Image (cartoon, rainbow, N blue to C red):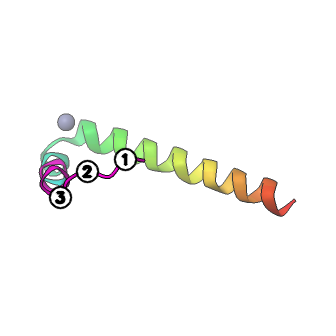
Amino acid sequence: MQALPESDVISLEEHLLICPDCRERLQAEIEFVTAMCGAAAKIRDG
Ligand SMILES: [Zn+2]
């Protein structure tokens, strides 16, 4: 994942506070990444 400049991160966080739509999308993305990490760990650990 690409790192954002700090000002962009802050404006994104502010946006997320007022935008349930983007919060939902971000949450879905986090869940997806978490699931992928879990799957990768399972594969790695056998
Ligand atoms: Zn939004």
Disc 3/disc 2 C-alpha distance (Å)? 6 Å
Disc 1/disc 2 C-alpha distance (Å)? 6 Å
Q: Which mark is residue 6?
A: 3
The image position of residue 4, as x and y in percent, is: 26, 50
Q: Which mark is residue 4?
A: 2
Please state if 36 lies on the left or on the right of 9 as rendered: right
Which region shows up in magenta? 1-12
Q: Quadrant of the C terminus?
A: bottom right
Instruction: Specify whether residue 5 is painted magenta.
Output: yes
Q: Hey, which residue is sitting farthest right in the picture?
A: 46
Camera-nearest residue between 18 and 37:
37
Task: Please report the residue visible at 28 percent of the width from the left and 45 percent of the height from the top.
Answer: 23
Camera-nearest residue between 1 and 22:
1
Disc 3/disc 1 C-alpha distance (Å)? 12 Å
User: Are dots 3 and 2 in contact, CB under 8 Å?
Assistant: yes
> In the image, is the residue at mark 3 within 8 Å of ligand 1 by its beta carbon?
no
Amino acid identity at mark 3: Glu
Amino acid identity at mark 2: Leu
User: Are dots 3 and 1 in contact, CB under 8 Å?
Assistant: no
User: Are dots 1 and 2 in contact, CB under 8 Å?
Assistant: yes
- Quarter of the figure with residue 24: top left
Please state if 26 lies on the left or on the right of 31 as rendered: left
Mark 1, residue position: 2
Task: Please report the residue visible at 62 percent of the width from the left and 48 percent of the height from the top.
Answer: 36
The image position of residue 38, as x and y in percent, is: 66, 56
Q: Is residue 39 above or below residue 25?
A: below
Camera-nearest residue between 5 and 26:
5
For label 1, the crowd category at 10 Å Cα-Cα, with few meaning under 14, some 14 to 19 and many 20 or more, is few
For the residue labelled by badge 3, is the local secondary structure a helix, a strand or a loop? Answer: helix
